[in-house]
Image (tube, grey):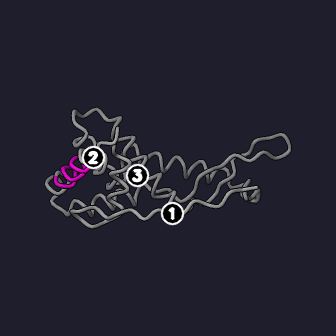
Amino acid sequence: MRRKQATKRVLAPDYKYGDPLVTRFVNGLMERGKKSLAFSIFYDTIEALSYKTKEEGLEIWRKALQNVTPTLEVKRRRVGGATLQVPVEIRPDRRVFLGMKWLIAYARSRGEKTMKEKLTNEIIAAAKEEGAAFKRKVDTHKMASSSRAYSHFNLR
């Protein structure tokens, strides 16, 4: 017997921009419970984006996030002894989660010195449809499109 489904918690908007999406991103950026440090890194990154691109920093971040959010992914399904990669559409909240997760993970793996520089450069690259996070989205879509033949094996 399944238990009841967990209720979705409403995130408080951040204090500078009043956007719950920013809070969600900062929660993913945070390590060891240091939320104020994560907020300062994010706000410094937005300022650096504004300075480097001469545009609104938050809008560039939103564009980058939109560019790296995937729409399809593959899930494994066992059919007659064979394991098939079945392409599935992603739920909207998971799309945003994956985009944020990839942006943060690939920013951390960059070679710059500080996290602010790493995140700034990864966001700029993603906004231009370049960079490792965007490449991950493209690879995910390629895997899903190459497995289109198995799309009739729908997942519950």
- Is the residue under label 2 in contact with that under label 1 (CB below 8 Å)? no
> Which residue carries the number 1 mark?
8
Label 1 Cα neighbours within 10 Å, binned few <14 / some 14-19 / many ≥20: few
Q: Earlier in the sequence, mark 1 or mark 2?
A: 1
Mark 1 and mark 2: Cα distance apart in space: 23 Å
Tell which of 92 and 28 is nearer to you.
28
Residue 97 is one of the magenta-drawn residues: no
Where does residue 134 sit, x and y in percent of width and height? 41, 49
> Which residue carries the number 2 mark?
38
Residue 84, quarter of the rendered image: top right
Label 2 Cα neighbours within 10 Å, binned few <14 / some 14-19 / many ≥20: many
Q: Residue at x 71, y 57 (%)?
A: 151
Task: Please name which of the two marks, 3 or 2, marks the residue nearer to the observer.
Answer: 2
Tell which of 42 and 99 is nearer to you.
42
Q: Residue at x 27, y 46 (%)?
A: 38
> Which residue carries the number 3 mark?
100
Task: Please name which of the two marks, 1 or 3, marks the residue nearer to the observer.
Answer: 1
Give, as a three-letter code, the residue at label 3. Met
Task: Please name which of the two marks, 1 or 2, marks the residue nearer to the observer.
Answer: 1
Label 3 Cα neighbours within 10 Å, binned few <14 / some 14-19 / many ≥20: many
